[in-house]
C-alpha cells in the first residue's frame, strides 16, 4: 500500500511541477534531472566515478559510501576506478549514462576535462553530485550539488596553526602542492599561504607540486631542503605527500615539523603519524559520504525538487593534544 501511495505521490508531484513550469526556466535546468530520477519506483542504481582508487583517501571514501548505501533499501552503488586518468573517467561517466543510472556521483580527477561529461549526464536527466572536487561551473546549475570540505579554510587553519603554534618566532616554511589542475590543490595552497600571513616573521621559501604522490613528494622535498636547509615547517596538501616529506627530512637529517591534510585513520594514516610524533599535525578532510547518500535519498526517494547546491563538511585539527585519543590509544 505504501508503495502505491508513494507512486501516486510521485506522479502527482510530477504533474504539479509540470503544470507550474518548474517556476522559472533557470530553475528548470537544475530541477529536471531530479524530477526524472524520482519518477522510478523500487530499485535505484547510483554510479560513482572515483578519481583514483589507489589513493588511501579515496579508498576511505569508497568504504564510507558503500557502508552508507547499504543502509538504504533499494540502493545499489556501482564504483568505477578512474585510475588517475581523465580519459578513463570520461568513459566511465559515459558508460553510466548509457546504463541510465538513476544518479551519478563523481570525484573528478581534473576539473576542466571532466566538465563536458558531467554536462552530458545532466542533459541525459541524471542528477550529478560532485564529491571533494568540482568540475567547471556552478553547483545547482551545471551540476546538482557539491559536497566536500572547504579546502581553502582547512589549509588556512593549517597556516594559522603554523603561525601561532609551530613558528611563533618566525622562520622558513615550504609547501607541497597536489595536482595543480585539481581544485583542492589550488585551494589548499592558497589557503595555507593566507593562514601564515598571521605571522609576518614566517617566510614561505619554496612551493612545488607533487601531484598527491609520496615518492614525488620525497623527491621534491629533498630538493627543497638542499636549496633551503633552514626550512622548519612543511605543509603537505595530503597525508600521502606528508609521508614522503618525512622520509626526505629523515634522509637529510633534518628536524622538520610536518603538517598533513586528510587525517586518515588506520596504521598508515595521518592520525597515527601525529600520535607517534612523526608529524606536528594533520587536518581531516571528511569524505562527505554520508551526506552524499542522504542527498541521494532526498532526490530518489523523497522526490525533492531542490537540494542545497553546496554542502560543506567540517574539518578537525589532529594535534599532539588529541591524536592519541582519536587513534584509540
Image (cartoon, rainbow, N blue to C red):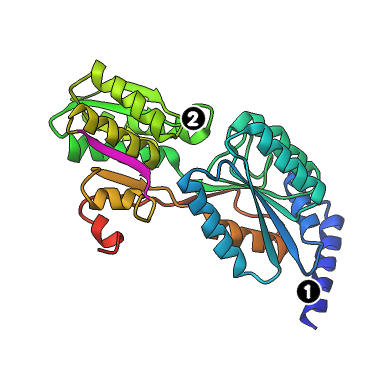
Q: Which residue is mark 1?
A: 6
- The residue at the point 20 percent across, 47 percent down is 277
Query: Quarter of the image holding residue 299?
Result: bottom right
- Above/below status of 166 relative to 98: above
Report how far apart the C-alphas of labels 2 and 1 lie in the structure. Answer: 45 Å
Residue 285 seen from this side: yes
- The residue at the point 44 percent across, 34 percent down is 213
Label 1: which secondary element = helix
Q: Main secondary structure of the magenta part?
A: strand
Give residue 64's position: percent from left, percent from top: 52, 59
Give residue 222's position: percent from left, percent from top: 29, 24
Quarter of the image for the N terminus: give it. bottom right
Residue 190 seen from this side: no
- Above/below status of 212 relative to 2: above
Label 2: which secondary element = loop
Residue stretch rendered in magenta on the structure: 256-263
- The residue at the point 45 percent across, 43 percent down is 150
- Above/below status of 131 relative to 40: above
Residue nearest the observer in this picture, 202 or 77: 77
> Dot 2 surroundings within 10 Å: few (below 14), some, or many (20 or more)?
some
> Dot 1 surroundings within 10 Å: few (below 14), some, or many (20 or more)?
some
* Res 179 label: 2
Give residue 149's position: percent from left, percent from top: 46, 46
Amino acid at each position: 500500500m505504501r508503495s502505491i501511495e508513494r507512486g501516486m505521490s510521485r506522479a502527482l508531484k510530477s504533474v504539479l511541477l509540470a503544470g507550474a513550469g518548474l517556476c522559472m526556466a533557470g530553475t528548470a535546468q537544475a530541477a529536471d534531472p531530479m524530477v526524472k530520477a524520482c519518477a522510478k519506483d523500487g530499485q535505484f542504481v547510483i554510479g560513482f566515478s572515483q578519481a583514483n582508487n589507489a589513493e588511501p583517501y579515496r579508498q576511505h571514501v569508497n568504504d564510507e559510501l558503500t557502508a552508507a548505501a547499504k543502509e538504504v533499501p533499494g540502493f545499489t552503488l556501482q564504483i568505477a576506478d578512474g585510475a588517475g586518468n581523465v580519459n578513463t573517467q570520461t568513459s566511465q561517466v559515459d558508460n553510466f549514462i548509457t546504463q541510465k543510472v538513476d544518479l551519478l556521483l563523481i570525484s573528478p580527477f581534473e576539473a576542466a576535462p571532466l566538465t563536458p561529461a558531467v554536462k552530458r549526464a545532466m542533459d541525459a536527466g541524471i542528477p550529478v553530485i560532485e564529491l571533494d572536487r568540482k568540475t567547471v561551473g556552478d553547483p545547482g546549475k551545471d551540476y546538482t550539488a557539491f559536497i566536500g570540505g572547504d579546502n581553502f579554510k582547512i589549509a588556512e587553519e593549517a597556516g594559522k596553526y603554523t603561525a601561532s603554534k609551530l613558528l611563533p618566532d618566525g622562520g622558513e616554511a615550504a609547501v607541497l602542492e597536489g595536482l595543480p589542475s585539481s581544485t583542492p590543490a589550488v585551494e589548499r595552497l592558497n589557503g595555507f599561504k593566507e593562514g601564515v600571513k598571521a605571522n609576518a616573521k614566517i617566510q614561505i621559501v619554496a612551493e612545488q607540486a607533487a601531484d598527491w604522490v609520496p615518492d614525488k613528494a620525497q623527491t621534491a622535498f629533498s630538493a627543497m631542503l638542499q636549496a633551503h636547509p633552514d626550512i622548519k615547517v612543511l605543509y603537505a596538501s595530503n597525508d600521502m605527500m606528508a609521508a614522503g616529506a618525512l622520509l626526505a627530512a629523515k634522509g637529510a637529517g633534518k628536524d622538520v615539523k610536518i603538517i598533513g591534510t586528510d587525517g586518515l585513520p588506520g596504521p598508515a594514516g595521518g592520525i597515527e603519524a601525529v600520535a607517534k610524533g612523526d608529524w606536528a599535525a594533520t587536518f581531516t578532510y571528511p569524505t562527505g559520504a554520508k551526506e552524499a547518500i542522504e542527498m541521494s535519498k532526498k532526490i530518489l526517494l523523497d522526490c525533492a525538487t531542490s537540494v542545497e547546491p553546496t554542502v560543506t563538511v567540517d574539518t578537525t585539527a589532529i594535534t599532539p593534544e588529541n591524536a592519541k585519543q582519536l587513534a584509540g590509544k
